[in-house]
């Protein structure tokens, strides 16, 4: 199993997952050419991809979806509400709809979907179960509901949103309505919220935590790491590797 944040931040997001039989992108938030270039940086050729899973319709998660799917003839998985909310997907090789909260199978993967409170039509988090273990992908949360906390338990790898530092957001350049939206129940998780969620998900099988969707304006990596490390220092269950996602380049690839 390999996991990598191809891109992570407010301008574009994509996650690469590889199992024994599958090579999957979760979201496609950059142009198809740029996504292909970044995949090549981690040794993955675009034609080897098997599918794209979509979390929600916002441009930083779907900007390159249609062109990428057509370029490589990729099946696309999303719920009907997200499909209806997309400006234009165009024709794709295959479109698979799922009911939010249900599970589906893609090749050797069992995929659970979790409803989120972000301000999109019907956003979801994913838990992808492989023969090597479970991977939880939860960004653009709004709030970490009880259901989210329950369904993300038992993952070997977690990709969690650490979008903003609350002080930097409060004192930063964004207009007040945007600050209110980010801080609200339909916005994004702060560093503190991320650390609190992680505290509920710690177990002795957790090996890697990716900190994702980090704002370049309202956050710094060291602030997010400080919040997470405080939680880790209070427990003796596990010492997961912490990987900070970047907007400008792919993260390290974690192999399990």
Image (cartoon, rainbow, N blue to C red):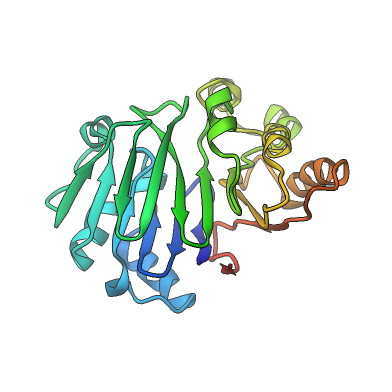
In the displayed structure, does residue 127 sit left or right of residue 94? right
Residue 171: image location, x then y, percent? 73, 29
- Quadrant containing the C terminus in the rendered view: bottom right
In the displayed structure, does residue 240 sit left or right of residue 93? right
- Residue in the foreground of this view, choosing between 72 and 175: 72
Residue 114: image location, x then y, percent? 44, 33
Q: Is residue 107 above or below residue 59?
A: below
Q: Residue at image x 58%, y 23%?
A: 146
In the displayed structure, does residue 249 sit left or right of residue 203? left
Q: Residue at image x 38%, y 31%?
A: 101
Q: Is residue 27 visible?
A: no
Residue 7: image location, x then y, percent? 50, 58
Q: Residue at image x 63%, y 43%?
A: 217
Farthest bottom residue in view: 43
Q: Is residue 1 visible?
A: yes
Farthest front residue in view: 131
- Residue in the foreground of this view, choosing between 76 and 12: 76
Q: Is residue 210 above or below residue 163?
A: below
Q: How many marks?
A: 0
Residue 51: image location, x then y, percent? 29, 58
């Amino acid at each position: 199993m390999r996991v990598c944040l191809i891109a992570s931040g407010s301008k574009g997001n994509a996650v690469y997952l590889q199992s024994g039989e599958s090579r999957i992108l979760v979201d496609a938030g950059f142009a198809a050419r740029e996504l292909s270039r970044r995949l090549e940086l981690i040794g993955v050729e675009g034609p080897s991809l098997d599918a794209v899973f979509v979390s929600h319709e916002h441009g930083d998660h779907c900007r390159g979806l249609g062109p990428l799917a057509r370029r490589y003839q990729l099946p696309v998985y999303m719920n009907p509400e997200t499909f209806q909310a997309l400006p234009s997907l165009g024709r794709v090789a295959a479109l698979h709809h799922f009911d939010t909260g249900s599970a589906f199978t893609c090749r050797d993967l069992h995929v659970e979907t979790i409803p989120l409170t972000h301000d999109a039509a019907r956003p979801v988090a994913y838990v992808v179960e492989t023969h090597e273990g479970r991977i939880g992908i939860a960004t653009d949360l709004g709030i970490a509901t009880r259901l989210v906390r329950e369904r993300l338990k038992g993952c070997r790898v977690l990709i969690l949103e650490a979008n903003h530092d609350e002080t930097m957001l409060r004192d930063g350049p964004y207009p007040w309505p945007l600050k209110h939206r980010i801080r609200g129940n339909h916005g994004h998780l702060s560093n503190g919220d991320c650390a609190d969620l992680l505290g509920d998900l710690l177990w002795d099988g957790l090996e890697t935590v990716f900190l994702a969707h980090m704002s370049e304006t309202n956050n710094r990596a060291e602030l997010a790491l400080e919040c997470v490390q405080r939680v880790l220092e209070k427990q003796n269950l596990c010492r997961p590797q912490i990987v900070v996602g970047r907007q400008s380049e792919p993260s390290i690839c974690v192999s399990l």
